Image: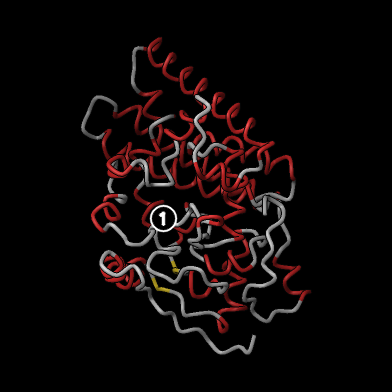
């Protein structure tokens, strides 16, 4: 099953009338434009701090701030535009999907298909339908798991961390096809994966050439490398989605987690902390997820109130799963007779 064919009819769905669901599914160009404008302003301000502090120790916190804003928001916008829900306009969704895919190092053709596969087979482990977005496969490796949160930490585990796809792109540019593409991308689309990967590599080389011309590392550091040193916020948020929970179940309440975040992190993450809600109804725009949560929350597990509470259950689960691959957090769900 490929993009555009996601069938969630056999999965758990909360009781909600069609009129209300239709209202929450409405997309908005205005909300998308406002959100992306705030992102660009934040990038400009944090980027300006990087430039004026370059050559001093102040550039370290400046780059960490810039990198996390750059990467976390780029990937969350990339994700939302892939679902075509960030804007009402299909052209705007397509344009910003391509831009943010490049910025985040998530090659756009591959992720178009593999992410729909993720929604179709969320945390399924059978080889023929394996979910490559399972970022904590069992048995878990606790040291590598926690290294993901440190700037540059995931480089130690570069082949297993799905968020770092730069090396995958280089392999695809050389026509070396990764298993995720063979599993999730139609054969007729694989040539597009190769060509788009080659375009990304060409653009990276152009940025490197610009740095050489300007005799400064800044272009490379601020355009190519943010996914490597600005990974902390995205990884801390992203790992809460499914870590420690059940696999191979057609009930997102048991395999997915919702966490309540502060407004700043929620903005960078584009409300994807409401992840159960997103998986149940992936066509609801991120701008509406918080309000939608209020409508269906009585039919879902209680959300985790902040990262501390979330990781209070995740950490012991990851440690246990390193020794017992059959262990998972057995989430108690409300009885909705559905």
Residue 159 spot, x, y in % from top left: 37, 41
Is residue 52 in view from this perspective? yes
The quarter of the image holding the N terminus is bottom right
Relative horizontal placement of residue 30, taking residue 111 as reference (left or right): right
Q: List the single residue furthest toward the front.
A: 127
Q: List the single residue furthest toward the left.
A: 57
Residue 232 spot, x, y in % from top left: 34, 49
Examine the rendered structure and indicate whether residue 220 appears above or below residue 338. Answer: above
Residue 70 picture quarter:
top left
Element type where label 1 sits in the image? loop
Q: Nearer the viewer, residue 5 or 152?
A: 5
Residue 87 spot, x, y in % from top left: 69, 49
The quarter of the image holding the C terminus is bottom right
Picture residue at 31% right of the left edge, 50% below the top: 148
Mark 1 surroundings within 10 Å by alpha-carbon count, few (fewer than 14), some (14 through 19), many (20 or more): many
Picture residue at 40% right of the left edge, 23% below the top: 219
Relative horizontal placement of residue 47, taking residue 249 as reference (left or right): left
Residue 107 picture quarter:
top right
Colour basis: secondary structure
Q: Which residue is mark 1?
A: 135
Is residue 30 in view from this perspective? no
Q: List the single residue furthest toward the top.
A: 213
Picture residue at 55% right of the left edge, 55% below the top: 128
Relative horizontal placement of residue 217, taking residue 119 as reference (left or right): left
Residue 139 spot, x, y in % from top left: 32, 62
Examine the rendered structure and indicate whether residue 175 appears above or below residue 15. Answer: above
Q: Could you tell me how many numbered marks the image carries? A: 1
Q: Nearer the viewer, residue 49 or 197?
A: 197
Q: Nearer the viewer, residue 49 or 185?
A: 185
Picture residue at 52% right of the left edge, 20% below the top: 202
Relative horizontal placement of residue 186, taking residue 51 as reference (left or right): right
């Amino acid at each position: 099953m490929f993009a555009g064919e996601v069938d969630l009819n056999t999965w758990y769905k909360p009781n909600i009338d069609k009129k209300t669901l239709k209202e929450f599914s409405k997309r908005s160009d205005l909300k998308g434009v406002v959100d992306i404008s705030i992102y660009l302003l934040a990038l400009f301000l944090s980027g300006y701090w990087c430039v004026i502090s370059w050559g001093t120790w102040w550039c370290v916190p400046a780059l960490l701030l810039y990198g996390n804003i750059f990467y976390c928001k780029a990937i969350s916008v990339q994700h939302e535009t892939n679902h075509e829900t960030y804007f009402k306009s299909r052209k705007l969704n397509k344009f910003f999907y391509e831009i943010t895919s490049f910025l985040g190092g998530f090659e756009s053709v591959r992720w178009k298909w593999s992410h729909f596969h993720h929604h179709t087979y969320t945390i399924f482990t059978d080889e023929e339908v394996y979910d490559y977005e399972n970022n904590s496969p069992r048995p878990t490796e606790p040291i590598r798991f926690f290294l993901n949160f440190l700037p540059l930490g995931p480089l130690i585990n570069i082949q297993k961390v799905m968020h770092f796809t730069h090396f995958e792109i280089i392999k695809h540019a050389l026509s070396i096809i990764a298993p995720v593409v063979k599993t999730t991308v139609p054969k007729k689309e694989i040539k597009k994966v190769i060509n788009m990967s080659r375009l990304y590599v060409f653009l990276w080389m152009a940025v490197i050439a610009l740095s050489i011309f300007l005799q400064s590392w800044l272009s490379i550091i601020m355009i190519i490398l943010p996914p490597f040193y600005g990974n902390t916020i995205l990884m801390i948020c992203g790992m809460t989605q499914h870590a420690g929970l059940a696999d191979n179940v057609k009930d997102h309440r048991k395999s997915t987690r919702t966490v309540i975040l502060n407004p700043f992190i929620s903005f960078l993450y584009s409300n994807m902390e409401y992840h159960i809600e997103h998986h149940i109804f992936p066509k609801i725009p991120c701008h509406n997820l918080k309000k939608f949560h209020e409508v269906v929350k009585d039919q879902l597990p209680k959300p985790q109130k902040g990262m501390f509470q979330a990781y209070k259950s995740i950490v012991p689960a990851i440690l246990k799963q390193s020794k017992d691959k059959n262990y998972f957090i057995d989430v108690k769900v409300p009885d909705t007779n559905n």
